[in-house]
């Protein structure tokens, strides 16, 4: 591929504009030549951002099909609403345009199969943009696992714990898709920030497999209370009932015998936390406390508060396992979005596109991780009954070699 990559962006809401301003405009060898959004004002705003930043023009579209057909694109960034991710991605793949697709759950497994089948037929490059696979804590934990520091991994847990009440309630004003999903669905609607890094640690689709899950949801009270407390701001939501449970817990069992526990926690007051915890026969990594505990090295303390006070933040002792990309990250890269992980993930996508290397988060990963949403919805609706994962690799998971994101093991 030529040194300059012509990129189109589909979906210019908050996420699309953050990627544009935070990463893409300053990324060497990348030229955003077209932007698209269902709402013309968003597309025009994005085109103006490019013009004011680079003094260059970018075409603005409201129909992604028109953009794909008229522009000479090497790649597209798909950052539109969850409902449209797969259809937009498949349209680009069919036209031979490489796809970097933002995260979100799928609505049924047929949607995931469509993505897999389209990629297998076209072989157009595809990467799932799960930025948390590139973050500092997740890559440190993965390196500790790969080095054997934590022993044989038995269980992992994580969460998407993020107070989104204001964002959800403002859905009508801000034209945000989360509102309609919370009103009408009850599921683990945003699983990949936690399940993605865990799946990479456990070699899912590459020697291991998600086999089945069971999900349960609490009652839905958080959003209704929030709207009651702020009724003057959201009169259009007065009396609305939300389907989405405030807390959703999902347990996944793996072919290797490991278990995974993830939690959705977005409509009650709290601080942000992804709560990654990796448990092995020789130790643990606790992302919430930025802590590593190794058997025979750290003291087994009975006083929980004293233990956390003593050990919180002790991952600094394991800096040799921190990827060089994080030890050497620049202030500019740190400021590029989500503390630097947006830069690292998009750099990897474009590097793979230029060299022809295998995308580290591929279509099979996207399908399996996104399916947690659809399968959890089925499980919750049937009282927590187990639901089986499709094998999107069609048996190839038994022979596919492990593939980490490129920063792993580069210490």
Image (cartoon, rainbow, N blue to C red):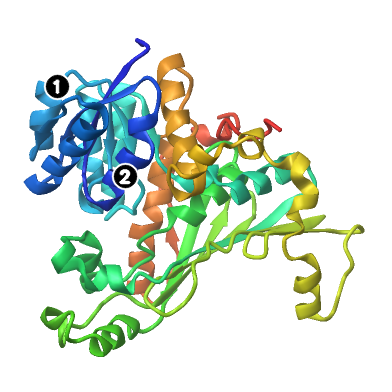
In the rendered view, would you say 56 is above or below 235?
Answer: above
Q: Is residue 306 left or right of residue 82?
A: right
**In the drawing, what numbered circle is on residue 71?**
1
Neighbor class of circle 1 (other Cα within 10 Å; few <14, some 14-19, many 20+) is: some
Query: Does residue 281 appear in the picture of this structure?
Result: no
Q: For numbered disc 1, what is the local secondary structure?
A: loop
Which residue corresponds to the image point at 23% horizontal and 47% vertical from the top-left?
80
Q: CA distance from mark 1 to mark 2?
A: 27 Å
Give coordinates of residue 403: x percent, y percent.
57, 32
Picture quadrant of residue 384: bottom left
Q: Which residue is mark 2?
A: 112
In terms of sequence position, does the residue under pointer 1 or pointer 2 come before the other?
Answer: 1
To which quarter of the image does residue 260 belong?
Answer: bottom right
Quick one: which residue is furthest to the right in this view? 296
Q: Residue at x 32, y 74 (%)?
A: 165
On the image, the x and y values in percent for residue 74 come to: 27, 20
Labelled disc at residue 121: none
How far from the left and from the top, in percent, is residue 167? 28, 67
Residues at discs 1 and 2 in contact (Cβ within 8 Å): no
In the rendered image, residue 104, in percent from the top left (x then y), is placed at: 34, 52
Q: Quadrant of the N terminus?
A: top left
As drawn, the residue found furthest toward the top would be: 2
* Label 2: few (<14), some (14–19) or many (≥20) C-alpha neighbours in 10 Å: many
Task: Kindly tell me whether residue 17 is visible in this rendering.
Answer: yes
Q: 195 above or below 71?
A: below
Q: Residue at x 19, y 40 (%)?
A: 46
């Amino acid at each position: 591929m030529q040194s300059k990559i012509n990129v189109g962006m589909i979906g210019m809401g908050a996420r699309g504009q953050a990627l544009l301003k935070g990463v893409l405009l300053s990324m060497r060898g990348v030229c955003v030549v077209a932007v698209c959004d269902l709402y013309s004002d968003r597309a025009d705003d994005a085109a103006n951002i490019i013009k004011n930043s680079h003094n260059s023009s970018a075409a603005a579209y409201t129909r992604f099909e028109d953009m794909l057909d008229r522009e000479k694109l090497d790649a597209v960034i798909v950052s539109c609403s969850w409902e449209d991710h797969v259809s937009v991605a498949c349209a680009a793949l069919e036209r031979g345009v490489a796809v970097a697709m933002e995260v979100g759950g799928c609505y049924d497994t047929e949607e995931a199969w469509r993505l897999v089948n389209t990629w297998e037929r076209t072989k157009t490059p595809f990467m799932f943009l799960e930025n948390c696979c590139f973050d500092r804590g997740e890559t440190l934990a993965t390196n500790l696992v790969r080095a054997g520091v934590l022993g044989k991994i038995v269980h992992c847990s994580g969460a998407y714990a993020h107070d989104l009440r204001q964002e959800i309630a403002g859905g009508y004003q801000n034209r945000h898709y989360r509102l309609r999903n919370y009103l009408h669905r009850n599921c683990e609607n945003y699983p990949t920030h936690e399940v993605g890094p865990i799946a990479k640690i456990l070699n899912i689709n590459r020697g291991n497999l998600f086999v089945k899950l069971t999900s349960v949801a609490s009652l839905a009270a958080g959003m209704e209370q929030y709207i009651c407390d702020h009724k003057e701001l959201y009169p259009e939501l007065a009396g609305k009932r939300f389907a989405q449970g405030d807390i959703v817990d999902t347990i996944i069992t793996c072919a290797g015998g490991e278990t995974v526990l993830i939690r959705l926690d977005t409509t009650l007051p709290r601080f942000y936390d992804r709560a990654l915890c990796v448990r092995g026969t020789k130790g643990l990594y606790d992302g919430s406390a930025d802590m590593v505990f190794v058997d025979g090295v750290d003291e087994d303390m009975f006083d929980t508060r004293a233990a956390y006070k003593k050990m919180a933040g002790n991952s600094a002792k394991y800096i040799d396992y921190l990827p060089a990309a994080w030890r050497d990250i620049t202030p500019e890269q740190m400021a590029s979005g989500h503390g630097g992980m947006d830069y690292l993930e998009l750099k990897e996508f474009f590097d793979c596109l230029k060299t022809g290397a295998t995308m580290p988060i591929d279509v099979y990963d996207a399908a399996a991780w996104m399916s947690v949403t659809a399968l959890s919805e089925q499980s919750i609706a049937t009282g927590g009954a187990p639901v089986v994962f499709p094998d999107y690799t069609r048996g190839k998971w038994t022979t596919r070699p492990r593939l980490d994101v490129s920063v792993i093991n580069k210490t």
